Image (spheres, grey):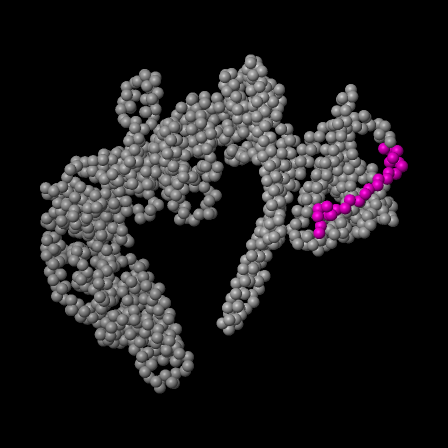
Amino acid sequence: MQPLYLTLRLSSIVIIKHYQEEGQGSEVVQGVLLGLVVDDRLEITNCFPFPQHTEDDADFDEVQYQMEMMRSLRHVNIDHLHVGWYQSTYYGSFVSRALLDSQFSYQHAIEESVVLIYDPIKTAQGSLSLKAYRLTPKLMEICKEKDFTPEGLKKANIGFEHMFEEVPIVIKNSHLISVLMWELEDKSTVADKHELLNLSSSNHLEKSLQLLMDRVDDMSQDIVKYNTYSRNLSKQQQQKHQYLQRRQQENAQRQSRGEPPLPEEDITKMFKPPQPPPRMDTLLIAGQINNYCQNVKEFTSQNLGKLFMAEALQGHN
Amino acid sequence: MSRFFATGSDSESEESSSADEITPKAPGTTFKQSLLLSDDEEDTKRVVRSAKDKRFEELTNLIKTIRNAMKIRDMAKCLEEFEQLCRAFLKSKNIVDKEGVPSFYIRLLADLEDYLNQLWEDKEGKKKMNKNNAKALSTLRQKIRKYNRDYETEIAAYKENPQESADEEEEKEPEDSGSSSDSDGDGGDEGVSSKSFLKKKPEAASEASKFLKSAKGSGDESSSSDDDDDDEDWGSDTVDSGSESSDEGEGRSASLAVVFLKKTQDSDKPSEKKLGKKKKPKKKERLEEEAEEEGGEEVEGGWEKVKGGVPLVKEKPKMFAKGTEINTAVVVKKLNEILQARGKKGTDRAAQIELLHALAAIAAENNLGQGILVKIKFNIIASLYDYNPNLAAFMKPDMWKKCLDCIDELLDILFDNNNHIFIGENIAEDSENLAISDQPFRVRGCVLTLVERMDEEFTKIMQNTDPHSQEYVDNLKDEGRVCGIVDRLLAYMENKGSTEEICRIYLRRIMHTYYKFDYKAHRRSLGLQGESKSEQDQEESEGEDSAVIMDRLCKFIYAKDRTDRIRTCAILCHIYHHALHSRWYQARDLMLMSHLQDNIQHADPPVQILYNRTMVQLGICAFRQGMIKDAHNALLDIQSSGRAKELLGQGLLMRNMQERNAEQEKIEKRRQVPFHMHINLELLECVYLVSAMLLEIPYMAAHEFDARRRMISKQFHHQLRVGERQPLLGPPESMREHVVAASKAMKMGDWRTCHSFIINEKMNSKVWDLFPETQRVREMLVRKIQEESLRTYLFTYSSVYDSISMETLSEMFELEIPTVHSIISKMIINEELMASLDQPTQTVVMHRTEPTSLQNMALQLAEKLGSLVENNERVFDLKQGVYGGYFNRDQKGGYQQKQSYQRGTLNQKGGYQQKQGGYQRGGYRNQNQSNY
């Protein structure tokens, strides 16, 4: 399948909406993307958020809400085709089972759908972080079969690198928005503009490291689990082997004595293979770790650059 | 026969029926039977009889149906009914055991068998029978054959007298024939019994003569009673026969039965009873105790009651017939008689004790010598202990008092006749020498066991008394007496006993000493310095120091004891005592030398509880001495489990209630330590928490960023967390809250607040005032808090300072400069604080080599990744192991190389660290040099 090119016509609106939602709380926010496919491009023109869940309205019907919303949007003649969803994230920690599952169901139902990941913190630091992802066809395949055993994943030959594919984004603003932006830039102070040059790094790095460490711990646990599993498996294989050999010997003896061979028993029943641990989580964790690493790398390289720049400036002065 | 039972509970019918049963039976079994018979005669309760009747009626009804079925040859019905009968008979087994197998039952069995055999022989008749019936017949025949095997003798006896059954049969036809047949039946019965008696007549006669003799011995009263008073007559008769038979065995029982029969046959039972009842109030003199005895007798079975009956007749010497020469042999015999009832079901224990007391009085009265008295005393005490059949129940106060008195008296006797009485458990019953002679008395028995038992009873009483009641205090006052007895016995044993016995009594003594704080000795030790000795002090200080006593006793046990348990207990008590009196080093050394910590888990629960108590006391002692670490270590085991209460045997935990059943609970309850020996749990917890605080807070401050920071005390952390979870922090209320608040203050290095939280009015009254040397402990605590706060402060805020003057520190923490200097030096040497001391300016210069939090994180991450890689490699290893060998060999080298590479990096890391350390130390030195 060809990669889809995305054009965000109304990116500012999307971002503004995100910000608005951000104000409500520091939780992850989600919403629906609306747009349409034009040639080989997916144009996202509008969006609306999922309402925040509260304890009070547990019987809130989300699907109903979405349908209502889309119907209303159609009434005002805005693009109302469902083309994906968006989610906010912190420090790039979005690779999770929940994301995988929902993106799978989206992509399963609407082929062209994407998930848009937006990192408000990074954006606040001065670089807009907006990324669109899709599941790779391979992963779709696996998810369809729901085969997360080690063998299944091995057969599919899928690594954490091949789970998601990033879709390039082109942002296009309407003229009105562009004008607004220009005006905003004029008004904003110098400090606001040069947030990008902030030298402090430890806070962000610490956070990232902390998250990274948690993932590594999870990974370790998973590996230990897998380890015990494979050890058990091999032990059982051995037992099975021994049993079969014994059986064979016995049968040979019986044959020599002219007795009928022992009846075949259901070996699979006798040696139930241990439950293989699902490997999908491990893959996801690996993907997440990769993500963190990329983030840290990017961040540090930028920061180093800034530091050198600052040093040079100092030396120059 | 059935008629008797149908007519209701007539005692006469009862008699005759039992007489019937007795005759065919072997004499051996009848002995008991007659015994019980007498019981019944006297006062069988109506209820019992009706129960019996009910059963028997059921049986007879069943038998009736069987007989009917027999008549119509309905075998199936017969079989069915027979099975029911068997069941019913089984159900009434209790009664049957008491009464003997009822003859009508035997009769049926015999008849049925005959009948069946007859049918069996009758081939033609069998052929005529339908299939069902034939089948039932064969089954029934087999069944009854098998069943009858158990009653062979009875059936044989019955077959000898088929005429009886014939009588019965006749009676049976007119179902309710009334009085004529009644008398008829009686006659028949009598005939039978008399017939069977005939066989044994000569013996019975001789017995009778014997009775007469003894009866004569008992004086005219009995003879007079023979004339007019049936009750008395019967009483005395049975008494004598009772004593005789118990001596001479069972053979006589049949003739006994004669006695009973004779009497019962010519006397009317109910009237007899009434008479007896009327009599009682008349005899005022014996009324008091005898009435009580009588009451007891009514419950009990067997011979004792009868014995009790004797005093009914005569007034003064209750035990013996009047005029009997009371000598040792007689008394011993009597004693044995009394003792035979011991432990038997239904024996009235209170009465027995009374009897023994009476016997002792008689023995004393007749000057039979101390030997017999000692023997009786032994038995009195033993029966006092026996008074409670239930092991869990405790003695009643009056019993307990009695017991104490008795033991005291016994000891008095033993002391008075120090050289004339030998007692021991090893003296055989027959080699006893109780009579007054030139030889010293030899008595079987063990005072030590009695005293030990008494001690246990005391513990039990204390366990079962509400510790907050006045009663407890009253009971506790007895402890003095108990101790006194133990002491006296100890003195006695030291002269006479074997080493083992001495060890045992020593242990008892130790057990009563170890947990008491010796205030006298304490005051004396203070007084030696303060030298103002009042008279009272002098008076008080006369007794030996408990420490000296403990030392002497324990050392004896260490040297002489051969059972491990006593020694273990002695060591533990000794340690406890040392710890209690703040002799920390002795206590610790003893604990370490004894190696008890290694194998205490193999000991039995009470010893383990003692061990736990000792450890706790040791910990508290260490705390008082300012050895915070030792205190913490000693208390860790007990406190970390959260079951201190249970481990110290000071109460059961509620949450375990479901896990254990009632039986276990009882056992556990028995292990509880009496309240007056309890260790204050709040004190214990407070000491533990404060020690944990003093250790943990600086440690936490030092290892703030350490990923692998281990907890010194989980419980302390738990308390901290509980404190943090509090939504609103008010001023601390409980001891725990105080410690938590203090910990928080200490975390900030604020020692004054910490101090005010730990030592204040509330805490004083709750905890600190419980120590004997309150002031000293408090001073120690303040000092410790200052020191540890200083350390914490330095750890927490060292990164803020470039340098800090020691003078400032000493002002801040109110410590002398040398102390501050030494603390900081120690920290630097232990590489806890990266700093150096600048001597001339008296400042601490910080090096700032501590990694930042980011660096720390990175280090942690590296560690984690290391373990991840390791795990991953293990997966790989496994793969290799599974899939083929040759692959392996090639790669192994590489893998090992890799490992060695890793090790190389590790070494490098180590080297780096070393270098760092070297650098620092070097720097320190360098700086010093440069400073000088």
* Residue A55 quadrant: top right
Whole-percent x, y for residue A128 in the image: 79, 36
Whole-percent x, y for residue B19 in the image: 22, 66
Residue B243 placement, left or right of A293: left
Whole-percent x, y for residue A105 in the image: 74, 51
Residue A317 placement, left or right of B152: right
Q: Residue furthest bottom?
A: B124
For the question of whether residue B879 can be seen, the reply is: no
Q: Residue furthest right?
A: A175
Q: Nearer the viewer, residue B312 or A217?
A: A217
In the figure, B816 relative to A75: above or below?
above
Quadrant placement of the N terminus of chain B = bottom left
Whole-percent x, y for residue B609 in the image: 39, 39
* Residue B863 quadrant: top right
In the figure, B435 relative to B51: above or below?
above
Whether A175 is among the magenta residues is yes
Q: Nearer the viewer, residue B605 or A283?
A: A283
Q: Residue at x 68, y 52 (%)?
A: A154
**Range covered by the magenta-colored residues:** A157-181
In the figure, B281 relative to B645: above or below?
below
Whether B640 is among the magenta residues is no
Quadrant placement of the C terminus of chain B = top right
In the figure, A121 relative to A115: above or below?
above
Residue B252 placement, left or right of B690: left
* Residue A272 quadrant: bottom right
Q: Residue at x 56, y 30 (%)?
A: B700
Q: Nearer the viewer, residue B789 or B130?
A: B789
Q: How many marks?
A: 0
Q: Residue at x 15, y 45 (%)?
A: B434
For the question of whether residue B162 can be seen, the reply is: yes
Residue B290 placement, left or right of B763: left
Q: Nearer the viewer, residue B125 or B572?
A: B572
